[in-house]
């Protein structure tokens, strides 16, 4: 059986054996198929009734994918776990558009950070001031909703308002969308175009490299 997330593309879902039981455990802001505790409990229950249970996630399950939480709960319940690593969207999506996150002429450091934090976590909030001054490239996951606040904090921390920004929705899928702007313009662009999640944001001068001529992204049939 397969328990899959919302970020798994329809093309990948079509590869699943039609005889396999499939359950959507996807999450969107304000629209959860099931709560995280319910997902974990479902995995434990299904592990006792099925020979193989696949927890199918988009990207890498250990990078803002709650894979570590689910693995820990399964092991605590006596369920053996095998992890198949993936390529996180914060690396794959920019690469697909020809944007290197590091480049000798533009960036020697990169930070990956979530723009959507859970309530009651181990610390109250991301230190956006430290993030702004700590890396030349910043990749934000799940940050579209909170981007106005994040942009304000970055500018107050001293980032140039003309710093390039690109939002990437649906990564390598055929219906992928991009929105290119700057810290100064991107929030207004989101409102004007009604650009919505799920998307990652890449902030830094490496975004300029997307404009290079002669680059052709690989066509990924499975999304």
Image (cartoon, helix red, strand yellow):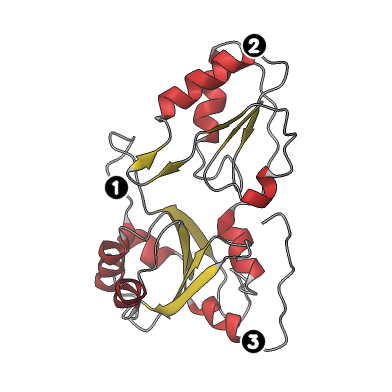
The N terminus: image quadrant: top right
Q: Is residue 132 above or below residue 82?
A: below
Q: Quadrant of the C terminus?
A: bottom right
At which x and y percent is residue 100?
62, 71
- Earlier in the chain: of badge 3 and badge 2, it is 2
Which residue is more in the foreground, 23 or 212?
23
Disc 3 marks which residue?
212
- Say which of marks 3 and 1 sits in front: 3
Q: Which mark is residue 184?
A: none
Question: Earlier along the polypeptide chain: callout 3 or callout 1?
Answer: 1
Residue 160 at what x, y percent from top left? 34, 80
- The vertical placement of 162 against 33, above or below, is below
Q: Residue at x 63, y 49 (%)?
A: 10
* Residue tagged 1: 125
- Disc 2 target residue: 49
Residue reaching furthest to the front: 18
Residue at 73% over, 59% down? 221
Residue 42 rendering spot, x and y as whole percentages? 51, 20
Residue 103 relative to residue 150: left or right = right
Measuring 42% from the left and 58% from the top, which residue is drawn there? 197
- Callout 2: SS: loop
- Decide if residue 141 is on the left or right side of residue 130: right
In front of the other: 180 or 62: 180
Please say if the residues under marks 1 and 2 sit with CB atoms less than 8 Å apart.
Answer: no
| SS for dot 3 | loop
* Identity of the residue drawn at 71% across and 21% down: 52
Q: Could you classify mark 3 by the number of other residues whose Cα lies within 10 Å: few (under 14), some (14-19), or many (20 or more)?
A: few
Classify 37 as above or below 174: above
Residue 21 vs residue 67, the one in the foreground? 21
């Amino acid at each position: 059986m397969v328990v899959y997330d919302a970020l798994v593309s329809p093309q990948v879902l079509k590869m699943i054996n039609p005889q396999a039981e499939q359950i959507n455990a996807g999450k969107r802001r304000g629209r959860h198929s099931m709560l995280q505790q319910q997902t974990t409990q479902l995995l434990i229950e299904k592990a006792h009734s099925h020979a193989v249970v696949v927890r199918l996630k988009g990207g890498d399950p250990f990078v803002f994918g709650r894979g570590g939480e689910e693995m820990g709960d399964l092991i605590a319940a006596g369920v053996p776990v095998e992890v198949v690593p993936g390529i996180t969207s914060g690396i794959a999506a920019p690469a697909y558009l020809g944007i290197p996150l590091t480049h000798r002429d533009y960036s020697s450091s990169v930070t990956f950070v979530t723009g959507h934090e859970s309530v009651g976590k181990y610390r109250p909030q991301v230190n956006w001031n430290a993030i702004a001054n700590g890396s030349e490239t910043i990749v934000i996951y799940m940050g579209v909703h909170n981007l106005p606040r994040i942009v304000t904090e970055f500018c107050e921390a001293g980032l140039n308002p003309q710093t390039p920004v690109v939002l990437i929705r649906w990564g390598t899928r055929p219906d992928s969308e991009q929105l290119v702007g700057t810290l100064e313009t991107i929030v207004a662009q989101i409102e004007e175009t009604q650009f919505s999640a799920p998307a990652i944001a890449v902030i830094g001068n490496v975004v300029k490299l997307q404009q290079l001529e002669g680059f052709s992204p690989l066509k990924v049939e499975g999304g």
